[in-house]
Amino acid sequence: MDNKILFEEGKSELSPEGEKFLTNFIPIYSSTIFSNKIFDDQVSRIIIEGHTSSKGKDQDNMNLSFQRALAVTEFIDSINFPEKQALKQKLLAAGRGEIDSNQEIDSPEDRKVMFRFQFKRADLEELFNAKYNQP
């Protein structure tokens, strides 16, 4: 998302610019994911991670980052696009707080949301058997 700033400092409500960006981004993003059956089958979750700057208390930042992730998932639910139901089934909100922030400065770029994929793994029994050559 190229470090798009979707939130004002200390806020979990999407900014008007953030809403406009997501309104354009989400339909393209989801159509890309669901246009390829192999890719769709391999992605088990799409994790929406909220982030904060290093300003403030750790616990407050963790809560704020989670609220930001929830705001994005709720906004996704409010817009219409063809793959909406399929996308919603894969979404998971997570707060990362200031873990990935630039600790040296209070940077607005740290007030972001990231989309990450969780891919399906091969059957663990198959992995174990392959590693230890057991039938």
Image (cartoon, rainbow, N blue to C red):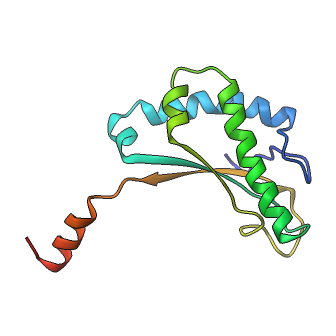
Looking at the image, can residue 53 be seen? no
Q: Residue furthest left?
A: 135
Residue at the image position 11 percent from the left and 77 percent from the top: 133
Q: From what the image shows, is residue 39 above or below residue 112?
A: above
**Which percent across, then down, holds residue 109?**
81, 56
Question: Of residues 78 and 20, which is closer to you in this image?
Answer: 78
Q: Position of residue 103 (x, y in %)?
A: 82, 74
Vertical comparison of 13 with 80: above or below: below
Q: In the drawing, does residue 32 fall left or right of residue 38?
A: right
Residue 124 picture location, percent across and down: 27, 65
Q: Residue at x 38, y 42 (%)?
A: 39
Q: Position of residue 18 (x, y in %)?
A: 79, 37
- Asked whether, in this view, residue 14 is left or right of residue 31, the answer is right
On the rendered structure, is 53 left or right of 122? right
Q: Residue at x 32, y 40 (%)?
A: 38
- Depth check: give the residue in front, 64 or 53: 64
Whether residue 34 is visible to the viewer of this picture, yes or no, is: yes
Quadrant position of residue 26: top right
Q: How many marks?
A: 0
Q: Residue furthest bottom?
A: 132
Name the image quarter holding the C terminus. Answer: bottom left
